[in-house]
Amino acid sequence: MLYLLKSSIFAFIFSCFFSFSLIRILRRRGIGQRINLDAPERHRKKEGTPTMGGIAIVISTCLVYLLMRGNNYSLPLTILGFSLIGFLDDYLSIKRGKSLGLKARHKLLLQIILSVVVLLSTKELTTYVHTPSGVRYFELGYFYPLFAILLLVGFSNAVNLTDGLDGLAGGCSAIVAGGMALVALSLTEHDYGVFLAGLSGACLGFLWFNLYPAKIIMGDTGSLAIGGALAYSSILLKEELLFIWMGLVFLAEALSVMIQVFSYKTRGKRVFKMTPLHHHFELSGWEEPLITTRFWLVNLVIVLIGYWLTLLR
């Protein structure tokens, strides 16, 4: 437990420092967030807020992992890889002067290619999935690579979709990473625990400046990286199903978009007022800090239930 606390505290301190420095650098260079025209009207005031703050999260997580003498370099390389895709998207959006970065199909292709490379480079990749209770494992065989790619790409984009309100994605990511770190501790997986605890601490440090009203936004640079790193950690721990449960808030955000698109194309009707899900509550009259806090609380309860199931094995 002590090494998890160390990793988390150091990452928190580093992330606070890097986030503060980034705010000054980005403001000086006029690098700010471009707001999507489809976003709620109240989001117009966020225009110009320094973005790409995910750099602070990624650097802090990797730095602490190296300082704590982590041995599995596939973890920092994975978070860096997904972060680079996000950085390219953010950079193009800023360069073009509007909320239009990489085309969706190009971003998806890059994510799939990176996921395949990550899985191919993983030593002793097994094809079974660990269940929370009952039968301990079931074999996916040849379907496992497809499942793993969907997990990596899916949650990378799910965290990205969740990053729409100040502090929402950062807070939920800190909770999920912290929960997964405790799972790694229960499995005596030192390396994975250090990485996940560092990621949790880095998200909390960034959150110091990302709370409403945000002074900096993580952008795709951070959200794609966090989602990919969390998913890959679950693959290494063989706790993919547990991670899906703990990441239920991310999953709900992504599913709301899919349901909305499917319903509109097939029936010509919308299920939600706006997607992702947090925008539906915004248009229902909820204030932004209230939505964020309640999503955190729901996520915390979900993670605690997941960890409790782990202890009952």
Image: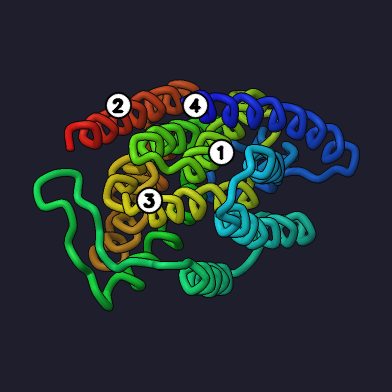
Q: Closer to the camera, 112 or 61?
A: 61
- Disc 2 designates what residue? 301
Task: Confirm whether residue 218 shows in the render.
Answer: no
Per the model, the C-alpha gap separating discs 1 and 3 is 16 Å
Q: Residue 254: x, y in percent?
A: 38, 52
Contact (Cβ within 8 Å) of mark 3 with mark 2: no
- The answer to whether residue 223 is left or right of residue 26 is left
Residue at image location 55% in from the left, 69% down from the top: 114
Mark 4 or 2, nearer chain start = 4
Q: Residue 14: x, y in percent?
A: 72, 31
Q: Residues within 10 Å of mark 2 (few under 14, many from 20)?
A: few
Q: Residues within 10 Å of mark 4 (few under 14, many from 20)?
A: some
- Disc 1 designates what residue? 199
- Disc 4 designates what residue? 288
Q: Which residue lies furthest to the left in this view?
A: 134
Q: Is mark 3 on a helix, strand or loop?
A: helix
- Disc 3 designates what residue? 237
Query: Looking at the picture, does residue 259 appear above or below residue 179?
Result: below
Foreground: disc 3 or disc 4? 3
- The answer to whether residue 270 is left or right of residue 24 is left
Q: What element carries label 4?
A: helix
Contact (Cβ within 8 Å) of mark 1 with mark 3: no
Per the model, the C-alpha gap separating discs 3 and 2 is 22 Å
Residue at image location 57% in from the left, 36% down from the top: 198
Q: What residue type is labelled 2?
A: Val
Per the model, the C-alpha gap separating discs 2 and 1 is 20 Å
Mark 3 or 2, nearer chain start = 3
Q: Residues within 10 Å of mark 3 (few under 14, many from 20)?
A: some
Q: Closer to the camera, 193 or 307?
A: 193
Residue at image location 36% in from the left, 37% down from the top: 183
Q: Residue 54: x, y in percent?
A: 66, 44
Query: Looking at the picture, does residue 197 appear above or below residue 274?
Result: above
